[in-house]
Image (cartoon, helix red, strand yellow):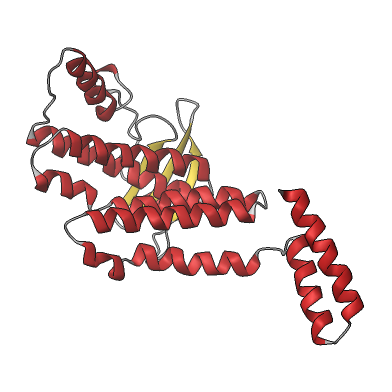
Amino acid sequence: MSLDLNTILKDWPHENGNIKVRKIAGLDGREKLQLRVDLGVLQMELAGRPDGRRPHNCESLLEYHQRRATRAAGKGETYELTPEQCAELQQEGIQYYHRYLSLFQINDFDGVVRDTQRNLDLFTFVSEHTDREDFSWSLQQFRPYVLMMNTRAKASIFLGQGKFAEAIAEIERGRDGIVDFLQQSNFPELVSKSSEIAFLDEWLEEVKAKRPLSKLEIMQREMETAIAKELYERAAELRDAIKLLQAKKH
């Protein structure tokens, strides 16, 4: 069997500006996720650590260190990450980044929520277990982006279910989370420059514009139209109906 990858690469060419992802059947019988990159293909497991390894018999290095930190806390001890451990955790986080980016392309939003939340937990864990601000910020600088992707996935799930109000609330929550993080960081001026905030603001307006009007909103617009046309009897009927509907909601 040839080790040359050219056959695979030629049949699935890379395209600049286009993220190409596919699922394939692995030799072990499990589905794999493949991401086409300029110099080849990244292949990932769909669950667990993307490379399929189990460091220290744990699902991930993060889980391994979390367990050790929990044991240390139980003994009243502090758990401090070494620079090498921080670097290893960051490399592992990149694997999950590649996977959630790929999962987003195939609309596996549940998987995106899982992996983005996992990396958000990673950022928090490293910040809590190192005194080095540079190590902490090397990960935390990506929090706005990961929060945005987490928000996009959660809101997309709601939109797929036709739950516009919930999707709008999720987008607003994600946007506010990014603003809060940046304002509390050493770089609050980034709030006005954040591409993540700008994207969520624009998407929020798009979703609001597509949201079907509620029964109450339809009646309110009908009442405004009736008043404008001086159909006061109809306007009064609508006003009473609106009050009744509002009372039922409370």
Q: On the rendered structure, is 130 left or right of 177?
A: left
Q: Please name whichever residue, 57 or 125, is drawn nearer the observer in this view of the structure.
A: 125
Q: Quadrant of residue 66?
A: top left
- From this view, report whether residue 184 is shown above or below residue 216: above
Q: How many marks?
A: 0
Q: On the rendered structure, is 172 left or right of 246?
A: left
Q: Quadrant of residue 65?
A: top left
Q: On the rendered structure, is 24 left or right of 190?
A: right
Q: Please name whichever residue, 209 or 246, is drawn nearer the observer in this view of the structure.
A: 246
Q: Residue at x 31, y 58 (%)?
A: 38
Q: Quadrant of residue 237?
A: bottom right
Residue 124 at x, y percent in the picture: 26, 39
Q: Please name whichever residue, 130 or 45, is drawn nearer the observer in this view of the structure.
A: 130
- From this view, report whether residue 160 is shown above or below residue 67: below
Residue 144 at x, y percent in the picture: 32, 55
Q: Tell which residue pokes out farthest to the top in this image.
A: 75
Q: Residue at x 51, y 40 (%)?
A: 110
